[in-house]
Image: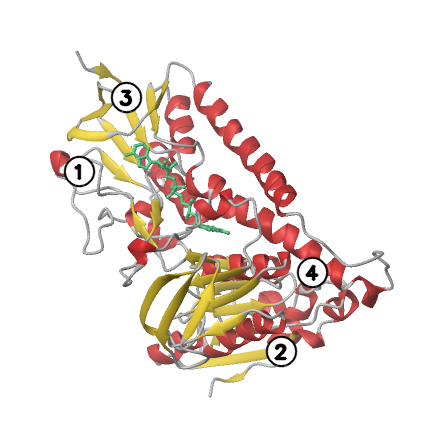
Amino acid sequence: MNKRFDAIIIGSGQSGPSLAARFVKEGMRVAVIERKHFGGTCVNTGCVPTKTLVASAYVAHMARRAAEYGVDVGGAVKVDIKRVMARKNAIVEKSRANIAQWMEGLKDSRVCRGHARFTSPRTVAVNGETLEADKIVINTGGRALIPEIAGLDRVPYLTNSSIMELDELPEHLVVLGGSYIGLEFAQAFRRFGARVTIVEMADRLIAREDEDVSDGVREILEGEGVEVRLGAKCLSVEKDGDGFAMTMDCATGAPRVRGSHLLLAVGRRPNTDDLGLEKAGVALDSKGYIAVDEQCRANVEGVWAIGDVNGRGAFTHTSYNDFEIVAANLFDKDPRRISDRIPCYGLFIDPPLGRVGLTEREVRAKGVKALSAKRLMTAVGRARERGETLGFMKVVVDAQSNKILGAAMLGIAGDEAVHAFLDVMAAGAPYTAISRTVHIHPTVAEYLPTLLGDLKPLA
Ligand SMILES: Cc1cc2nc3c(=O)[nH]c(=O)nc-3n(C[C@H](O)[C@H](O)[C@H](O)COP(=O)(O)OP(=O)(O)OC[C@H]3O[C@@H](n4cnc5c(N)ncnc54)[C@H](O)[C@@H]3O)c2cc1C
């Protein structure tokens, strides 16, 4: 006989656990199914471990610069990758255990550890059992995309998951993919002491950003000795001694790179291929993501898809917002929608990039009459005092409404200070809400009114 629940949650990513807890708070019985680690990508192989690595890398970098600050570290800085990874593991394991404990403690509910597959629109099989519910929520996330490259089947490679298991420092890490995930690893491993080469197929790094942002990021990385090959086409890999060699036609640099370790960071693909979705009649979009409406509802009544698996976001904060949207619509009579959110994200190299809203290029393409301003971080007192003056900040404003359309802050605290723009955008207020506010001295955010004082028509 089928085991009946009020709701089944498949996957314990960044929104499933919160929704499970809300269901229980509403008096429902829930089954939460997780096939691997509680917390999913973010906790185990994404945001959390990468930010611990970035933190260790920052310490190494600043220790090397210690003399500039009048501090003597008493010799060459050495990084012990085993201890770096042990620190990372301790932080990850604590977060993972907290989520598992939270789910196991949910009243009248059940946690199943196994791979879930739909057997009908209302039933899911796991570990040989069939569970049934009128509400089924898919929070299965995604995984690294493995590109089709000649020779890749004969060369060992790393992904964001397996690189977390490394216990030796690569002699030469080749990172295929010059976008958000690849760049964080590239800089961190360079700072740990590895030689690092980024191979990117586009003609610039993070090609969806404005050109000055791509250039600024490249300058930061190259300034630390990361090698960058752009416009790399016709890639192939082969074994070469105890490492591998990658050959390419590329716009910059040598056409052959020999490395000890290869990291693939060319994108993500949704975990929808082994979920039995065809048994439930759940429709996918053209890229294999679950097609959802503005409330995260799939085409089948009683089925929701939240987080990366719906293709409407690729971040922890968008996944969590999906939970908020589903809960608000189901229980709070609050018609929250996916399209309510303003795009925002960070690139956590050092210094970081904080981004909100439209890029300058997108504003131009829309043909909106706009104003823009840009200032270098060297002008910011706090950055100078900290000796961290790389990068710039810029903002684009609608010339008619005075509302902020988008901003990029590449520089120290850029990931935090950019929220001033985001919150004013969300409030629907004009940019003067920031420029007329007195900010705390000395901070990076205190410079935003000065930046906004420079607004001129967008060329
Ligand atoms: C290296 C890296 C760094 C990142 N850094 C950031 C960052 O700094 N900031 C940010 O906002 N985002 C970051 N992200 C993205 C972020 O990790 C994801 O957007 C976030 O984890 C989305 O989570 P999710 O809720 O969609 O599901 P996921 O976290 O992907 O979790 C899905 C869960 O479902 C389980 N599952 C899958 N299929 C099944 C099945 N059939 N049965 C049972 N269980 C199943 C999986 O085991 C997994 O635990 C990063 C990603 C990577 C790869």
- Residue type beneath disc 4: His
Q: Quadrant of residue 304?
A: top left
SS under mark 3: loop
Q: Amino acid at mark 1?
A: Leu
Would you say residue 396 is visible in this rendering? no
**Image quadrant assignment for residue 333:** top left
User: How busy is the neighbourhood of tag 1: few (under 14 within 10 Å), some, or many (20 plus)?
Assistant: some
Q: Are marks 2 and 4 in contact (CB under 8 Å)?
A: no
Q: What's the amino acid at mark 2?
A: Arg
Q: Marks 4 and 3: which is nearer the front?
A: 4
The mark found on residue 277 in the picture is: 1
Judging by the rendered image, the residue that carries numbered circle 3 is: 6
Q: Nearer the viewer, mark 2 or mark 4?
A: 4
Residue shown at the point (57%, 68%) measured from the top left: 409
Q: 361 or 225, which lies in front?
A: 225
Tell me if 333 is positioned left or right of 405 in this view: left
Q: Secondary structure at mark 1?
A: helix
